[in-house]
Image (cartoon, rainbow, N blue to C red):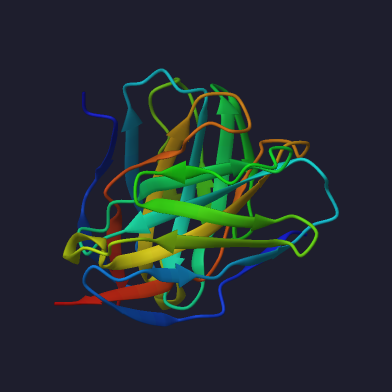
């Protein structure tokens, strides 16, 4: 059982470059989310999706785009990378229901120079 | 907007001893869920325990238990018989049952160090 798979695990970008962080889950979960983790700030929600074709903004959406064309995949696009986007990014998925457990990927450490 | 506060950036505990991590939250809602997640050095986020606000009984999972004080908006995690494998960052998180998307709101985290 793969669970939630994020690729790549590490990435270095130059300022202004674009890239896509991949997230795939094999648990048929309706809900998927992207978070960024920064020291002293915990995890903050970037974008989330409650099903294929439905996405919405979280707390810190600026500079990021998402789409959800299938239940399994939820890629996060950095349009023009900035040093402020240096962070660890986590993708999570869960079933519908308010008490359900969120399953997280292993994270992507992104450095923008 | 709901907020979650973890006031202890770092805590230390001796192996086999008990430690309590603090968490407070701010909400005007009456029904919600609270969670504790563990993040070891591997970076993997692992659910430790969850509590529904309408349940008065404190949740327990083996050596992990919570002290849920709804009126005080407090949700502390007690780890008994601490083990070296408990060393990690611990995050407290809140989820509103009524909000669209039922998003998780995290605290800043507490680093737990376990001494042998």
Pick out the residue farthest to the right. Answer: B28
Residue A12: x and y, percent?
23, 67
Is residue B59 shown to the viewer in this render?
yes
Residue B41: x and y, percent?
22, 64
Q: Quadrant of the C terminus of chain A?
A: bottom left
Q: Nearer the viewer, residue B9 or A42?
A: B9
- Answer above or below: position of A67 versus B68: above
Q: Residue at x 41, y 63 (%)?
A: B90
How many marks can you see?
0
Residue B84: x and y, percent?
17, 66
B30 with respect to A48 (left or right): right
Q: Nearer the viewer, residue A35 or B25?
A: B25
Q: Quadrant of the N terminus of chain A?
A: top left
Q: Nearer the viewer, residue B12 or A5?
A: B12
B52 with respect to B89 (left or right): right
B84 with respect to B106 (left or right): left
Q: Nearer the viewer, residue A33 or B11?
A: B11
Q: Quadrant of residue B14?
A: bottom left
Is residue A80 shown to the viewer in this render?
no
Q: Residue at x 82, y 45 (%)?
A: B30
Residue B2: x and y, percent?
74, 59
């Amino acid at each position: 059982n793969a669970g939630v798979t994020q690729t790549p695990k590490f990435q270095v970008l130059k300022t202004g470059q674009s890239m896509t962080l991949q997230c795939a889950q094999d648990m048929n979960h309706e809900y998927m989310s992207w978070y960024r983790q920064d020291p002293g700030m915990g995890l903050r929600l970037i974008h989330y999706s409650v099903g294929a074709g439905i996405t919405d903004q979280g707390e810190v959406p600026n500079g990021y785009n998402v789409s959800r064309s299938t239940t399994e995949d939820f890629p996060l696009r950095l349009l023009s990378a900035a040093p402020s986007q240096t962070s660890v990014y986590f993708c999570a998925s869960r079933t519908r229901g308010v008490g359900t457990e969120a399953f997280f990927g292993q994270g992507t450490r992104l450095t923008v120079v | 907007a709901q907020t979650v506060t973890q006031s202890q950036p770092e805590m230390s505990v001796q192996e086999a001893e008990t430690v309590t991590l603090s968490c407070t939250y701010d909400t005007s809602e009456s029904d919600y869920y609270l969670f504790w997640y563990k993040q070891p050095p591997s970076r993997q986020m692992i659910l430790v325990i969850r509590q529904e606000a309408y349940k008065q009984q404190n949740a327990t999972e083996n050596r992990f238990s919570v002290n849920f004080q709804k009126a005080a908006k407090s949700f502390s995690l007690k780890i008994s018989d601490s083990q070296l494998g408990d060393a990690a960052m611990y995050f407290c998180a809140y989820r509103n049952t009524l909000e669209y998307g039922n998003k998780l709101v995290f605290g800043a985290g507490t680093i737990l160090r376990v001494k042998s």
